[in-house]
Each structure stands twice: as C-alpha cells, then as structure tokens.
Image (cartoon, rainbow, N blue to C red):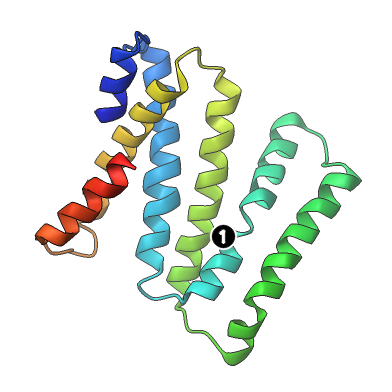
Amino acid sequence: PLLLGWAALRGARVRPTRAELWTLALSGTLLWTLGNGFVVLAEQQAESALSALILSSTPIWVALIESVADRRRPGVGMSLALLVGFGGAALLSYPALHDGVGADAMSIVVLLIGALSWGGGSLYQRRRHLVLDPVVSSGYQQLAGGCGMAALAFVPREPTPTPTPVAWAGFLFLLVF
C-alpha cells in the first residue's frame, strides 16, 4: 500500500486493467510467495550454503524456460556464462559443503521450486509488457506476495508475531532508509 500511495502522489496510474492485475498477482505470487517464501520455509531444515548453491541455479532455470518458450537452445556464450556463474557459487559454497551440511529431501525440493518460481515469475512479467509505472507494478506484486506469505505462514503453524519496540524501530528504519 505504501508504494501504491507514493505512486499515486507522483501522479502515476495506480489502477491496473484486469489483465495487468492478473499478471501482477501471478508474478507477485511466483516471485515473493513461492520464490522467497519457499526459501524461508526450506531454510528451517536446510543449511545456508546448500540453499545458496541451489538458489544460484535460478539463472539456469530462466535460460531453460526461455529456451522452451522460444523453441531455441541457449547460445554457447550464454551457456558458458551460466556455467561460470554456477561454478562460482559452487566454489564459494564448497568449504561449507565439504564439511557436511544437513537438509532433508523436502527442503531441497522446496528450494528448487523457489528458484524455478523466481525465474518463472520474472520471465512471466517481462513477457507481458505492462505499461504501468514500475513502482505501481512492484506495489501490486508485493501485495499479492504478502497475501500469499500470510497464507503460507499457516503451513508450519507459525506463532503470531509479537515484535518488540526495538524490532518496530528497526522495521521503520528499514522502511524509511
């Protein structure tokens, strides 16, 4: 709501068409609820080094989705770039992975779904060519993602949060700055 209010104050069109709203709701759910939300859910059981390595596969998923959608293989340069990027993430994760990390199979699957969802949500919106202000687009995506995250919080039966005044101050600091 804050982004949408800011966009309205700037004179941007904040009322999307039905087609735009559908695109924003779907991409926001893919990006925030399934992309980020699944990572948060999985990291309760999976260690960060393994999570980072799995999530670094996101550009690979994007290239695969695009190659299927466009019915053409990624070029050699793109393939090498993806390999170097993933190899770099593997190199950074290697010390922790070598020492042994823990994760259950479901967490790994959820992390892979998160990486695939983030890539899919990015591509979905990019291919829809919205004519909305980026702040408006982001506002609606985050609204959809927030609703999905609220629903997702019930899956592991998360307790109702009771933030302290210090937590509220930190939130306000991050919100403003």
Tell me where residue 107 sits by quadrant: bottom left
Measured as percent of width and height from the top left, residue 172 is found at: 22, 46
What residue do we see at 45% from left, 42% from top?
31
Q: Where's the N terminus, which quadrant?
A: top left
- Tell me if I can see residue 19 in this picture: yes
Seen from the viewer's position, the closer of residues 59 and 71 is 59
On screen, residue 175 versus residue 88, left or right, reads: left
Q: Residue furthest right?
A: 76
In the rendered image of this protein, does residue 176 appear above or below residue 130?
below
The residue shown at (64%, 57%) is 57
Residue under label 1, please give it.
55
The residue shown at (76%, 53%) is: 82
* Residue 8, quarter of picture: top left
Q: Residues within 10 Å of mark 1 (few under 14, many from 20)?
A: many
In the rendering, at what x and y percent does residue 167 appear? 18, 59
**Is residue 94 or residue 175 the one in the foreground?**
175
Q: Position of residue 130 (x, y in %)?
A: 51, 16
Q: Is residue 114 placed above or below 20 in the rendered structure?
A: below
| Quadrant in the picture for the C terminus | top left
Q: Secondary structure at mark 1?
A: helix
Q: Nearer the viewer, residue 81 or 45?
A: 81
Residue 43 x %, y %: 40, 69
- In this rendering, the answer to whether 86 lies above or below 25 is below
Residue under the image location 40 percent in, 35 percent down:
28
In-image side of 105 versus 161 (left or right): right
